[in-house]
Image: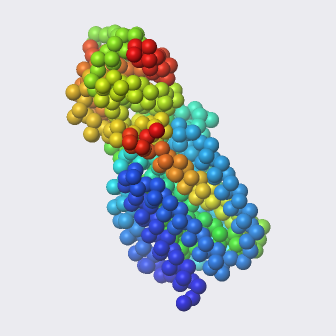
Amino acid sequence: MELIYLLFILVLSIFLGFALISRVPPLLHTPLMSEANAICGIIIIGALIAAGAEANSTLTIILGTSAVALAAFNVVGGYLVTERMLKMFKKKETAK
Amino acid sequence: MSGEFIVNLVYIVSSCLFAFGLKFLGSPVTARKGNMLSALGMALAVAATLASGHIISFQWILIGIVIGAGLGAMVAFKAAMTQMPEMIALLHGCGALASVFVDWTAYHVHGATDLTNAITLYLSIVIGGLTFTGSAIAWAKLSERMPGKPILFTGQRFLNIALISAILVLGAMFLINPARYDLFLIILGLSVFFGIFLVIPIGGADMPVVISVLNSYSGIVACTTGFVIHNTLLIVVGALVGANGIILSIIMCKAMNRSITNVIFGAFGAVVKKQAGGEKKEAKAISVEDAFLVLENAKSVVIIPGYGLAVAQAQHAVRELGEFLEKNGADVKYAIHPVAGRMPGHMNVLLAEANISYDQLMEMDAINPLMENTDVAIIIGANDVVNPAARHDKSSPIYGMPIINADKAKSVFVLKRSMATGFAGIENELFYYDNCRMIFGDAKQTVQALVAEFKSGH
């Protein structure tokens, strides 16, 4: 894809990120960060291509598979730990 | 419609789901739904990529996913809430390393196709490399596998400058001749090495900033990797995560009244050792029994937690104390300074874990106007964030830092092990105020003793 379109997407995404994240209250900053870790695991789609499509040498197999494992760790660890934390935030009525 | 087109459509849907996930984090009521939507977006993106036809062999992918997902689930369920900062640091490191491996594979297979490609490859491996080791050091410090104090040695500045210069010069050479595989590897190696020296001089209390900065780096790496492999979804998500880290870094720095460069290059702890001038006052101690008598008559209590609460694992005992105070007719609130703990929001998570209702958790700006009408402020394991010197003592290294005005309460109890100074290495004049009393000892035991008093008193 042309570079200029990718830059277009980048700039608009940065604006979107600032708009969305500045509305998250400090109360939820830790889950916000683990959520960010989880979505950062999106690198897994690059890793899948690296491990699956270009498996033509030992080096790429090792790099690709490690990348898949690391990214999967981020995705699964990130989402589960976010869920665990968010489950704990309760208001008095429902507490206990 | 081509397969490529469909895959990209799915990527658009995933981007929207990620955005909704972050939007719903705006309130604790909708946050879990947001997390679910975000996970759905991830599942769609992975499924679309697997079905895209680019992928020929699945065996290695399967092995990678089983190992990664298994370990991820294990760590996510095992980690205690007090260990969240180190867990987050670990995830930053893994994400960055995964990006570096993807870049490396792309370079190994295709080489650098043009100048843009070479530039983004270079940025990716530099930021990714230093984020990986930087996060590893942060993880080691937070989990106390390494001393949390700043590690300084002579020639450190020189070494850092030498490393940065080498990375820049070799980078220029790589851009001129992107076919030089050796340069690629040396730059990656130096960046990995540099990450270590970037984080070892930073002390424990500055970790909230370091974690936020590393968070934005991990996003930026995903972004540059998106440019390397021409993947729009990576660019979108990388930008979102990068923005997240930047916003949190700014909030943390403001809360310490310091600049990012000062945190990263400052080594705060070593700067000022100010002698307490003027008359030497004596801090007054109080026994648990007497403290109980004051608390029994209190109508409003504000509890101010700090990292010491996490160390002592006192959150459950504190919740019990809060419940007794409420039964006794007092209004109980928790005042949370943005940099209390070792990462943004750390204290909120600990108190939520102990089943404390989140509407009792107050931000600094919301609680400060209420402090004057507060009967008792109980400070548990916090120090610098309640030091009134930050408001008026221009010679104090923490002057200008926003603090929780605990000193304005009618009585202040400080739960502390000893008279040792906080992270900034400065005396806290609050301890010598007339309305302040010290309760020495382990925070958890002290709170439990207070709870026992309430139990026997009723």
- Which residue corresponds to the image point at 25% horizontal and 29% vertical from the top-left? B371
Q: What x and y, as percent, mark residue B327?
A: 36, 26
Considering every residue shown, the one lying at the far right of the view is: A58
- Which residue corresponds to the image point at 57% horizontal and 73% vertical from the top-left? B229
Q: Which of B28 and B206 is in front in this view?
A: B28
- Which residue corresponds to the image point at 59% horizontal and 37% vertical from the top-left? B143
Residue B182 seen anywhere in this rendered image of the structure: no
The answer to whether B142 is drawn above or below residue B302 in the figure is: below
Q: How is the image coloured?
A: rainbow
Quarter in which the N terminus of chain B is drawn: bottom right
Q: What x and y, as percent, mark residue B422?
A: 42, 26
Name which quarter of the figure residue B281 lies in: top left
Q: Nearer the viewer, residue B206 or B431?
A: B431
Q: What x and y, as percent, mark residue B4?
A: 57, 83
Q: Nearer the viewer, residue B81 or B111?
A: B81
Residue B61 seen anywhere in this rendered image of the structure: yes
Quarter in which the C terminus of chain B is drawn: top left
- Count the labels in the image: 0
- Which residue corresponds to the image point at 53% horizontal and 62% vertical from the top-left? B39
The answer to whether A77 is drawn above or below residue B430 in the figure is: below
The answer to whether B267 is drawn above or below residue B35 in the figure is: above
Q: Nearer the viewer, residue A2 or B311?
A: B311
Q: What x and y, as percent, mark residue B348?
A: 42, 40
